[in-house]
């Protein structure tokens, strides 16, 4: 995962930084599927987490891009929302030293190289207790082309979370993103995605 690339993206308008929570996260929350304390891993400028905090969840966001965390903190202060944002490495989640009831990952899993995934999953196991829920929103292999992040198959998700986890369901959805006239071209309505619901055994 190239930190410099992400820092450059945030200097301009990052296509995923829509200024709103992802519709898939809103749908989960409204259905009562997000519970208790929430960790947003790869939180960016914080819209998903700030939304959940307004719904009464204890909320912590982590991202490795300092400018993203600065913006998230500024939004929280401006809106008077009680939440915590920290600069940190998603491959070192154990360092947080605590557990959460729910972890959300919107657009992080698909950025990891194959050799990085095991460390990420070990970290998730450290921060989620038994029965805790992980929601992963990632690029789908049904999205045409090769622009943007790598595509992830349902089988890859199942293979990654086989030991100590139960993949409850994987549903097709889409990322809301900002269309870039000169930038990447994705499916109408946003890149196709998978929303995986995974329980910690």
Image (tube, rainbow, N blue to C red):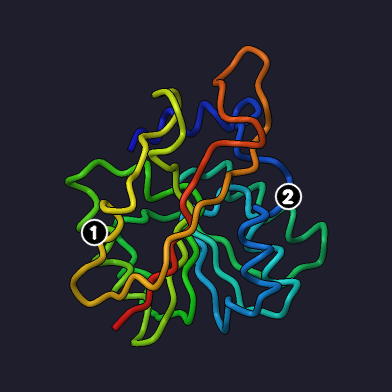
Q: Earlier in the sequence, mark 2 or mark 1?
A: 2
Q: Is residue 131 above or below residue 3?
A: below
Q: Secondary structure under badge 2?
A: loop
Q: Nearer the viewer, residue 168 or 90?
A: 168
Residue 20 image label: 2
Residue at image point 49% right, 76% down: 102
Count of numbered badges drawn on the protein: 2
Q: To which residue does mark 1 refer?
A: 160
Residue 92 image label: none
Q: Is residue 170 above or below residue 125?
A: above
Q: Quadrant of the N terminus?
A: top left
Front label number (2 vs 1): 1
Q: Nearer the viewer, residue 86 or 133?
A: 133
Q: Is residue 164 above or below residue 135?
A: below
Q: Nearer the viewer, residue 194 or 67?
A: 194
Tell me where residue 9 sits by quadrant.
top right
Residue at image point 27% right, 63% down: 121
Q: Horizontal and vertical percent for residue 147?
A: 44, 23
């Amino acid at each position: 995962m190239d930190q410099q690339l992400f820092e450059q993206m945030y200097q301009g308008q990052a296509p995923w930084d829509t200024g709103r929570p992802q519709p898939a996260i809103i749908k989960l929350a409204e259905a009562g599927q997000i519970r208790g304390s929430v960790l947003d891993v790869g939180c960016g400028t914080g819209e998903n987490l700030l939304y959940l905090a307004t719904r009464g969840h204890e909320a912590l966001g982590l991202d490795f891009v300092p400018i993203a965390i600065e913006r998230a903190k500024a939004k929280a202060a401006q809106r008077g929302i009680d939440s915590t944002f920290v600069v940190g490495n998603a491959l070192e989640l154990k360092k947080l030293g605590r557990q959460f009831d729910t972890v959300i990952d919107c657009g992080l899993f698909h950025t990891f190289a194959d050799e990085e995934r095991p460390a990420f999953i070990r970290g998730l196991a450290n921060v989620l207790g038994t029965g805790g829920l992980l929601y992963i929103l990632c690029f789908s292999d049904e999205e045409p082309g090769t622009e943007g992040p790598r595509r992830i198959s349902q089988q890859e998700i199942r293979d990654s979370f086989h030991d100590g986890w139960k993949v409850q369901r994987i549903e097709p959805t889409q990322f809301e993103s900002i269309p870039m006239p000169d930038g990447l071209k994705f499916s109408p309505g946003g890149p196709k995605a998978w929303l995986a619901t995974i329980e910690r055994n």
